[in-house]
Image: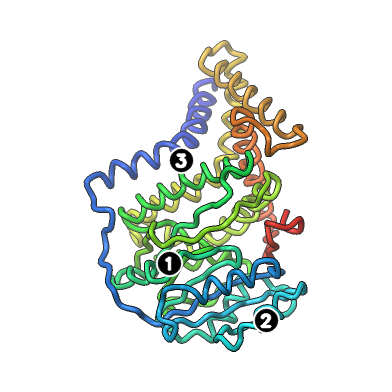
Amino acid sequence: MTAVLMAVTILCLMVPLYVYGGYPLALWLMTLGRPDVTHRRGDATPSVTLIISCYNEAAIIRDKLENALALDYPRDRLTILVVSDGSDDGTDDIVREFASQGVKLIRQEGRLGKTMGLNMAMEQVSTDITVFSDANAMYAPDAIGRLVRNFADEQVGYVVGAALYTDSDSGASARNENLYWKYELAIKSMESRLHSVVGGDGAIYAIRSRLWEPLQQKDINDFVNPLQIIAKGYRGVFDSEARCFEETAGDFDREIARKERIVNRSIRGLMRVKETMNPARTGVFAWQVVSHKFLRWLIPLFLVLAAIGSALLATQGFVLFQLVTLGAVLLLLLAVTGHLARDKNALPAWVSVPYYFVMVNLYSLKGILRALRGDTQVAWTNVRSKEGS
C-alpha cells in the first residue's frame, strides 16, 4: 500500500515540474538549431477586417479607434468593425462619431457575450484576413502588416502577435503577471517554430477569414477558433514583431478572477475540439496542447493529491516527503500572508510570488469545478473596472 501511495505521490509531484519546467525545456531542445521563422513570409497586402470587441469601453474606445485609423496599412485594404455587446455607458455613441471615417458599429443586444458578437460580425466579413482585437490593446503602427506577412505561407491558418504590458512596474500584481507573460511568450515562440502556437490571444491574432466557423455561445473564441483551424490541417504561428500594448488588470483579485474565467471556458472548449489531442490527427501539436493547456489546468488537482500523499508519507518517516510537506506548508503560509495584507500591490517578491501561484491555481480549480457542473460564463466585463473582478 505504501509503495502505491509513494508512486502516486511522486507522479503528482512530477506533473507540475514537467508542465512548468520539463515542457519548455523539451521545446527548447527540439527547436535547437531551427531558424526563428519556419514558414514563408511575404510582402502582399491582402484585404483585412479589424474586429474590435467591447463592452462599456467609453473610457478607452476613442483612443483605440484613433490608434486603428493610424495603422500603417493601406486604408483601402482595411475595414474596421466594432462589436458592442450591449454597452450602456456611451461607448456606441463614441464609435458612431467615427462613421465618416469608415468605422462600422455592430451592436448586439441582450449581453450575449463576446463569442456571439464575433459570430454576428463575421457574417459581414468579406476580406481575406480577419484580425481580432480588444478595445484596450493599442497596436504598433506596423502590427497589421507584421501579422499578414505570415499568410504568404498557404499552410498558415492563424497568426498570433505579442501583447506587451506597459505597466509592469506599477505594483506586485503587475510584476507577477508580466513575469508570467514573458514566460508564456517564450513558450509561444518555441511552439511556433516546432509546429504551432497553442491558442490565440484576444488582444491580437489573425485568421484566414474563410477558415472561420460559427462558435457556440460558451466557447472562448481565441482558443476554440485556433483549435478548429489546426483540426483543418493548418498551422498557427507566433510573430513577436506584431505587437500591441495594454495594461494588466491592476490588482491580484481581478487578475486571478480573470484566470478562473479563462480556465472555466477553455477546458470545455478543448473538449469541443478534442481531436486536436490525437497525435494521429495533429502530430506533435497534440503533445503541445496537452502539455501547455490540459495538464496545466489540472495542476491544482495534482498539487492537492501530492500534498495529501506527501503528508501521509511524512508521518511514516520518509525524509524526502517530510521536506516536501514542510515546503508546502511554507508556501501556504506565505500565500496566507499575502492574502491578509492590506496593500497586496506593495508585497515583496518573496511573498507576492507564492501568493500569486497559490491563488491562480486555487481559482483555476474553481474554474474546472464550475465547468464540470456545466456552469460556463459567457458574458465578460472590463477587467480594468470594478465590474471586472
Sort mark 2 into few (<14), some (14-19) or many (20+) by Cα contacts within 10 Å: some
Q: Is residue 27 left or right of residue 169?
A: left
Q: Name the image quarter holding residue 219.
A: bottom right
Upstream in sequence: badge 3 or badge 2: 3
The label on residue 143 is: 1
Q: Nearer the viewer, mark 2 or mark 1?
A: 1
Can residue 272 be seen here?
no
Mark 1 residue type = Ala
The label on residue 19 is: 3
Q: Nearer the viewer, residue 339 or 264?
A: 339
Color encoding of the figure: rainbow
Residue 81 at x, y percent in the picture: 56, 80
Q: Nearer the viewer, residue 313 or 37?
A: 37
CA separation, marks 1 and 3? Answer: 31 Å
Residue 52's place in the image compared with 335, above or below, is below
Q: Does the CB distance between marks 3 and 2 fall below 8 Å? A: no
Q: Which secondary structure lies at badge 2?
A: strand
At x 62%, y 21%, the residue is: 311
Q: Which secondary structure lies at badge 1?
A: helix
Q: Name the image quarter holding residue 387.
A: bottom right
Q: Is residue 222 left or right of residue 170?
A: left
Sort mark 1 into few (<14), some (14-19) or many (20+) by Cα contacts within 10 Å: many
Q: Nearer the viewer, residue 362 or 383?
A: 383
Mark 2 residue type = Arg
Upstream in sequence: badge 1 or badge 3: 3
Residue 165's place in the image compared with 312, above or below, is below
Residue 204 at x, y percent in the picture: 49, 64
Mark 3 residue type = Val
The label on residue 107 is: 2
CA separation, marks 3 and 2? Answer: 41 Å
